[in-house]
Each structure stands twice: as C-alpha cells, then as structure tokens.
Image (cartoon, rainbow, N blue to C red):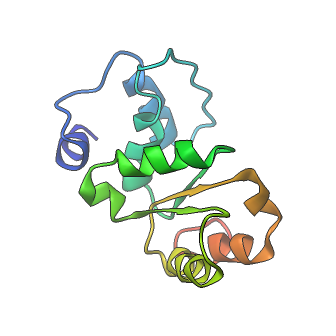
Amino acid sequence: MLKALHTLFGHPELRPGQAAVVTNVLARRDTLATMPTGAGKSLTFQLPAMLLDGATLVISPLIALMKDQVESLPATVRERTTLINSTLSPDEQRRRLDGIADGAYKLVYAAPERLRHQGFLQAMRAQPGSASS
C-alpha cells in the first residue's frame, strides 16, 4: 500500500486517519469515513481503487467537483480515470462506457442520475473484476 502510495500519488506516507480507512477498504469492509476538509478523504478511495480489481465508482452530484477531482490526480492515475456526466457528447459517452466495460478505468466518477441509465449500469457490470462478471 505504501509503495503504491508513493509510486502513484507521490506521497511518502498517509495522513492520520487515512491508513485505517484504506486498510478497511482494501479488506473489502464496508467503511464510513468522516474526516475534516483537507484531511485527504479522496485518497482513501483513490488509492484502494488503483489496487483492487475492477473499477471504483464515485458518485458526485457536482460536475465541477468531479472535474476538479479528476484534473488534480497524478497523470498515471488520471490515465485510468474517467467521468461520465451530461457535459459529454453522446459519442464521447459511448467511448467512455466502452472503456469502462473493457476494464480501461480504475476510477469512474459519475453523477447520481447515471444509476438510472441502463447503458451505464451495463458497462459497470461488464467490466473485468465486477461483482457480476
């Protein structure tokens, strides 16, 4: 975990509270983490996403927050990350859904309403390592 933290994110160590959350997530335990602003909550799901099979789905109601999250990722992590929202053209959405289904992404940011779209749900289910594949 610490090697991946350094290699992928450039951090030498985790902040207080992050290690327990990441350890629980890697052990596939249901985990609720409440941490103050700036404590590194995002890393507690981004790091495990890079280490676990399949893709991690991140639901965010704010397109700007999704965009900021993706743009702030290190390049090696950003390459394996996508977002699906209403700002994308239908062709771009289809390309990204195909990428999800093919296992090209480890992190998928999506708005809550995507959970009502069959094409999105099918792509998430089809990806290698998903619970239903």
At horizontal 50% and vertical 64% (from top left) the residue drawn is 54
**Can residue 20 be seen here?**
yes
At horizontal 18% and vertical 40% (from top left) the residue drawn is 10
Depicted 60 relative to depicted 95: above or below: above
- Front in this rendered view, residue 97 or 25: 97
- Front in this rendered view, residue 17 or 79: 79
Depicted 75 relative to depicted 29: above or below: below
Q: Quadrant of the N terminus?
A: top left
Q: Position of residue 129 (x, y in %)?
A: 53, 69
Depicted 96 relative to depicted 32: above or below: below
At horizontal 67% and vertical 72% (from top left) the residue drawn is 125
Q: Position of residue 116 (x, y in %)?
A: 83, 64
Q: How many marks?
A: 0
Q: Position of residue 24 (x, y in %)?
A: 50, 33
The quarter of the picture where residue 122 lies is bottom right
- Front in this rendered view, residue 124 or 19: 124
Q: Position of residue 117 (x, y in %)?
A: 79, 70
At horizontal 17% and vertical 48% (from top left) the residue drawn is 7
Relative side of 72 to 4, left or right: right
Relative side of 38 to 129, left or right: left
**Can residue 133 be seen here?**
no
Q: Quadrant of the C terminus?
A: bottom right
Relative side of 6 to 81, left or right: left
